[in-house]
Image (cartoon, coloured by chain):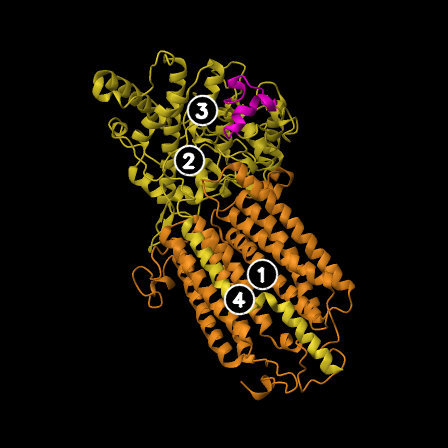
Amino acid sequence: MSASDELALSPASGKAVYASGVHRLAVALTVSVFPLIWVGGLVTTYDAGMAVPDWPGTYGENMFAYQAWLFGPFDLMVEHGHRLLGSLSGLLCIGLVVAAYLRDERVWFRKWSVFVLAAVIAQGVLGGVRVLLDERTAAMIHGCTGPLFFAIATATAVMSSRWWFERNGQRIPDRGVGPGAVGQYATGRFIALTASVLTVTSYCQLIVGAQLRHTTGAVSPNEFKGFVHLHLGLAALVFLVALVLTLSVVAASGTPKQVRRVSLLLAIVVLCQIGLGIGTWLVNYALPWSELNATLAAYTIAAKGYWESMVVTAHQATGSLIISLATVTSMRAWRSRASLGH
Amino acid sequence: MIQSRNSQVQDLLQSRMSFLSNSRIDSLPTVWLAIVLLGIGTAGCDSVGDRFESNRIFAKRWELTESIDLSEPLADSEVVLTEFFGTPDEPKWPKFLNAGKGELVSLQNLERVAGAFSSGEKGEHKGLFREHCVVCHGVNGNGRGPSSALLTPYPRDFRLGKVKFKSTPIGHKPTKEDLKKILHRGIAGTSMPSFSTLVPEDIDALVDYVIYLSIRGELERKLIRDAAIELDLEGGERLYDPGSKEKYPEEFAEVRGRIEEWAVDIQESWFAAENAVVNVVGPPKGFPLVGSGVDAKAAAASVANGKKLFQGTIASCAFCHGAEAEGDGQTHNYDDWTREWTVMAGLNPKDKQSLEPMVNLGALKPTNIFPRNLTMGVFHGGSSPEELYTRIVNGIEGTGMPAAPLKPANSQGLTNEEVWDLVNYLRSFLPVEDQSLESQETNSDSFSEEDASK
């Protein structure tokens, strides 16, 4: 870590310093979780959750020493690959704790990093429980807590960022004061609230989606129908909240670019997600009015087909991405309000 | 001034970040631990393997028409069916069914398909039915899986033993090849996927399991119908009472023997399918099949004649499919799967109130069966000349689409050449690139040319 990466302790305030190493580890963790979620989604799409029947080992071997997965069937590759990616996230969490205790002077952040480590371990154990008990419901809970962990990792990256420290009233010494410098912009309370509502709503939406993804024969047609309608209703709500957020951010010129950019990206991702949602229904169940269009009428779903699987998995992974982006938006929005003394 | 502002900001931040205060952070791992325990605590929540759900809707139909209570026979039927066929997790195939013509269904295949799904180190899959079929067709193949209420058409209920797209006439079972073809190809424009990515052994095993569920379901229906019509339930007669085995061994053996015979008869109907396949009598020599590239002018004339026949009163296709084959003829019929618990039970499919007892038992809202819009050029049972011919001369089971009357059996019926004109008319709706006979899975080589002596 170079000296310029570290912010010196402000003699006047005695506040904590930005530690780039901690932030880089937090970002690496966040970046590692997204493919983990993708591959986890593939595990569900391909029903590969029981491709490795034991845990934490793999077919009786140490999971890190097991090599057959690279040349084995696809099910085995995605399940074992998911476990290895999970281990990578776990190692990054350990590194985060060490770095936080060495470099970050905020006591609460150090404890937070321990929580992040505990969460990744718990998530791994939950995945193991799913395998050992061969329980679809446990798989669904594991699938719901995955995106929650993604949000936690994202929050960690935000809270360890330079911008977060700057918004604490500390100026970076070599940046000085001028247009665009710290304290020039603030986010309106409505925007911060809307972003928070979007975070919660999109997570609720993901939980309902997980019910549909992990449906078993024990679910009645009426229950399933109820979940589908709820999923559609929440999709409409997420879209509306995202729309309101976007319009509010565009209208409020004082919103910091760190909030504005993420919220606009969020709006684009929400739009993509709606398209992926329609696609997911189409490749799973076809549309009920297929004869309105010759292409739809001629479309035959391919069970476990490549494109079918990618669309479904992308829909699930994009749901997690929305939660992550909404987390960034709301945390930055509240932070940029707080720093101006609202 | 600046210092004062910084101090305010700091205070405010501390209050804003209070959700991250030490005590809260300490409790967060507890929350995660609770989630893990919840995961462990869900053991058994999604279990569907210990028993097949009884056909209560079919029993209710007889309760309504015969004014009797069938709850005891229904419980008895579950006992005998479990003895014969086991459970979704542990299927059985009764030995007495293998005594006659051999093995229709392999127990090894049933074990491969049943139970929770998993896959091995070499890629072999188990629990195929729950992996691929349950969400639509349900655990016992009743067509009422979780997603069923939202699908058009509803998924097939295997328990009637009826299949729409097959090579045998109405009233006959499909062959195993027919079922394999459906699984391999899927049904375009519907929720039925193509399982062409599965290895042939998996397809074979799934076909066996579908037949297993069908035979089990047909026997269940036979038991319920027999209890409703033949048994003196008020006099205490039982459909099947294992408790009487020691007390009245002869009577018990007689009852069990009768039920076994029914099961054998049902299995026999599946064996018989192979001999019921309708032979496709090919068109006369030089007939201009659409897509054969022979004599486009003659093919156009054949298509025009096919259209005339389509609209005529003998084939009477337009009555349902509409004059221009757009599926806009009559649209108020119901298929057999709906009729059997509505019309056959004396209930009006449009009268919500009268359907309530059935809906409460899980019956899906009746929907009309809509004739296909053939102009889309998408044919659910396949678009090869052979398959279209088969559908015209066989009809489509359970749908109201009858077999076309044919000469010489019916003096007013269609000639074989006229059937081929109809085939040409239907194939004229195919996109040009799909008309070529070389692009079909089955082509004109698969049937012989018409024998003039027939």
To the question of a shared chain for discs 2 and 3, the answer is: yes
Residue A114, placed above or below residue B308: below
Mark 3, Cα crowd under 10 Å, few <14 / some 14-19 / many 20+, is: many
First to last magenta residue range: B340-363
The span from disc 2 to disc 4 (Cα, nearest Å) is 63 Å
Residue bearing the label numbered 1: A321
Q: Position of residue A211 (x, y in %)?
A: 52, 47
Q: Are callouts 1 and 3 both on one chain? A: no
Task: Give residue B270's quadrant in the image.
Answer: top left
Image coordinates for residue B35, horizontal then vertical, percent: 47, 56
Foreground pick, B174 / B156:
B156
Colour that chain A carries in the picture: orange
Instruction: Report whether mark 2 lies on the same chain as mark 4.
Output: yes
Q: Which residue is mark 2?
A: B179
Residue pointed to by mark 3: B169
Which residue position holds label 4? B23
Res A265 quadrant in image: bottom right
Residues packed near mark 4 inside 10 Å, few (<14), some (14 to 19) or many (20 plus): few
Mark 2 residue crowding within 10 angstroms, few (<14) / some (14–19) / many (20+): many
**First in residue order: circle 2 vs circle 3:** 3
Tag in front: 1 or 3: 1
Disc 2 residue type? Leu
Taking the spot 61% from the left edge, 27% from the top edge, the residue there is: B321
- Cα–Cα span, label 1 and label 3: 54 Å
Q: Chain of mark 4?
A: B
Per the image, label 2 sits on a secondary structure element best described as helix
Give the structural element (helix, strand or loop) at label 4: helix
**Callout 1: residue from which chain?**
A
Q: In the shown orientation, is residue A12 left or right of residue B29?
A: right
- Distance, label 2 to label 1, CA atoms, is 42 Å
